[in-house]
Amino acid sequence: MTPRLGTMRLACMFSSILLFGAAGLLLFISLQDPVELTPQQIPGMKFSIRPQQHDGHLRIPTERITQDSPSGSPRGLQLQVPDQPRPHPKTKTAAGSSLRLRQRRRRLLIKKMPAAGTIRGNNSSSETFVQQRPHTMDSRWVSLHQSQQERKRVMREACAKYRASSSRRAVTPRHVSRIFVEDRHRVLYCEVPKAGCSNWKRVLMVLAGLASSTADIQHNTVHYGSALKRLDTFDRQGIVHRLSTYTKMLFVREPFERLVSAFRDKFEHPNSYYHPVFGKAILARYRANASREALRTGSGVQFPEFIQYLLDVHRPVGMDIHWDHVSRLCSPCLIDYDFVGKFESIEDDANFFLHLIHAPGNLTFPRFKDRHSQEARTTSRITHQYFAQLSSVQRQRTYDFYYMDYLMFNYSKPFSDLY
């Protein structure tokens, strides 16, 4: 046998072995379950601060993070693992279609909310300060305690019905930018302008030991000083800790009345900010044949012109906290407030709150008016006089603009022709 012939036979044998091996591998693969050949993907675990049962009370929702749990995690941190059973694709599609239909129906019917049944909201841990003391209250506090329970019930029902997605959102610094912190008595106060906020900040300064009396604190110190810290100035852990353990409160006011109060304060008196910034833009857009003097100073804005600006989706200058919605300022569907006061009963509500947090006995809520003190406070009667300048369509659109505030804080329709 020649060397050349031997080499050819070896090559043929090697090729045959390779072909048989490849055929065997293909046969093996064809007989396997494809699922077994695919690496199993373990869903990533996310840490989510969710409402959590603790001593009979629920933690508030705060913030989600997607990193490993630190050794000193804030209270209320709950390890959340995605559910393993997966719905059948057809079931999932049907559920999605049903959800979209419900959401569409809710949008269409939001103006026709029926009286809802009791829906238990998320009680924060600090709510114990109201719930644990009914037996120790004087009889004069009992009705105020009951009012608190009713206000929070109505607010939570409105949130559950029309802001359900809010409870799944993370709290960001923007959501707490209007919240002031008083650490000594562990109080968080969400500022709603034109609802007693100036005097509330005075009270917080006295509670913090920054002043001995509310009467000693000037208006500029209250609004332009830096004595009180805002919650968004703290780091994430500081925000989470205070939201989870401090007593959270806000005070609200009838929306139309609050709007008129803001207009009177900012546009009917000399103002070096609101006239040039808002007044000039409003007059230039909504007043036909505005005088040069009016366009130069921004003074003399009329209430109907102000309402045109408010309702314009393409308004020439942005929103302002003095007439923005409470639901945007304080995020009550995201942050579970322990105490909801009303401007209409501010003295009783405020002093009840001070009693509950064990404030000094000589500290009461001040009632003085430090700006335009000679001018009458904005009342329901004055509010109706201003709104009488508007058409019925403008009144309806303004009511629609503040509808969630009316709904959430249980205020009645201010005019009988509103729907």
Image (cartoon, rainbow, N blue to C red):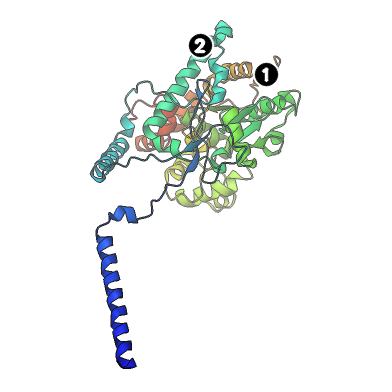
Residue at the front extreme of this rendering: 1
Residue 244 picture location, percent across and down:
57, 30
Q: What residue is disc 1 on? A: 359
* 338 on left or right of 185: left
* 211 on left or right of 329: right
Q: Amino acid at mark 1?
A: Ala
Q: What residue is disc 2 on? A: 143
Q: Quadrant of residue 249?
A: top right
* Residue shown at 48% from the left, 43% from the top: 46
Residue at the top extreme of this rendering: 139
- In the displayed structure, 279 sits above or below 416; it is below
Q: Amino acid at mark 2?
A: Ser
- Under circle 2, the secondary element is helix
Residue 138 or residue 348, whichever sits in front: 138
Residue 174 or residue 387, whichever sits in front: 174
Residue 242 or residue 261, whichever sits in front: 242
Q: Quadrant of residue 132?
A: top right
- Under circle 1, the secondary element is loop
Dot placed on the residue nearer the N-terminal end, 2 or 1: 2
- In the displayed structure, 35 sits above or below 385; it is below
**Dot 1, crowdedness within 10 Å: few (<14), some or many (≥20)?**
some
Q: Is residue 269 visible?
A: no
